[in-house]
Image (cartoon, rainbow, N blue to C red):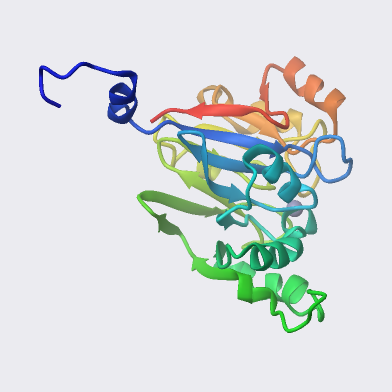
Amino acid sequence: MHLSEPVTDATIMTENPSQYALHFLGTGSGGELSMGCSAAVLEQNSEPRLLIDCGPGTLNAFHKAYHSLPTALFLTHCHMDHIADLEILTVRARLAGVAPVRLYVPVNLIALLHQRLATYPGSMAEGGHNFWQSFQLIPVQESFVMDELDFRLWATRHHAPGFSFALHLPGLFFYSGDTRPIPEILHHNMSGNETIFHDCGTEPNPSHTGLADLEKEYQPHICNKLVLYHYANESAAERLEQGGFRVARPGNRFTLAG
Ligand SMILES: [Zn+2]
């Protein structure tokens, strides 16, 4: 910028670094509908960059927020409360002329995703439609680059090894997906700045984290960075807050350090 040029708001905006946020479309555990299925959008300067998971109701919540369809998605795993709306997206994306939508899928999940959604015949009333036609499948493993963003994946503890994956953007955020506590990951691989969005209900179970797990499994500096999601309902959210933790609710946006 020339020194004699006036400093306008627009100038300041373009010289500021990108502002990233994680916007929760839903924070529920799938058992009840009041919180919506867990899904979140990575935003850059208020624009949606990447949708994480796409369960029942996620597409409508996305459209309500951005008046558009997602252009890039990442899937943590293939339980229906995380993938079911892809059946609607394959049709809507084709009709809207925005296909192919980039679909980042951990390699281990591809066969399961194909079996669960792509083998069902007649997904479009007009016929002649293959589920994959609307997507650009991008298999990912360990790490991947989306535009200038460098993501990492971590296999978590949900039902079986290699069944569910956390998404990590070092320095900005860690999104656990469905999981039991994962101290072997969180104690050794954070840069120190990430907000850690973590599965947590009021009670532990064999596939999910519960409130009593957190202080038992995690050191205080990790607990201080947690934002909890994937719980049953509003009263569960309040109990998690009473336990001293931050909790995400549908519609919440968390500005990310960067
Ligand atoms: Zn699950």
Query: Which of 155 and 43 lies nearest the eye of the viewer?
Result: 43
Side of 201 where 163 appears, left or right: left
Q: Is residue 196 above or below residue 239?
A: below
Query: Which of 97 and 61 lies nearest the eye of the viewer?
Result: 97
Query: Which of 246 and 189 lies nearest the eye of the viewer?
Result: 246
* Place of residue 194 in the rendered image (x, y in percent of width and height, measured from the top left): 47, 32
Side of 159 where 10 appears, left or right: left
- Does residue 175 show up? no
At 44% from the left and 37% from the top, the residue drawn is 190
Q: Quadrant of the N terminus?
A: top left
- Does residue 5 show up? yes
* Place of residue 113 in the rendered image (x, y in percent of width and height, measured from the top left): 69, 70
* Place of residue 227 in the rendered image (x, y in percent of width and height, measured from the top left): 62, 28
Residue closest to the far left? 3
* Place of residue 168 in the rendered image (x, y in percent of width and height, measured from the top left): 49, 45
Q: Is residue 166 above or below residue 92?
A: above
At 84% from the left and 26% from the top, the residue drawn is 234
Residue 37 figure quarter: top right
Residue 132 figure quarter: bottom right
At 78% from the left and 25% from the top, the residue drawn is 237
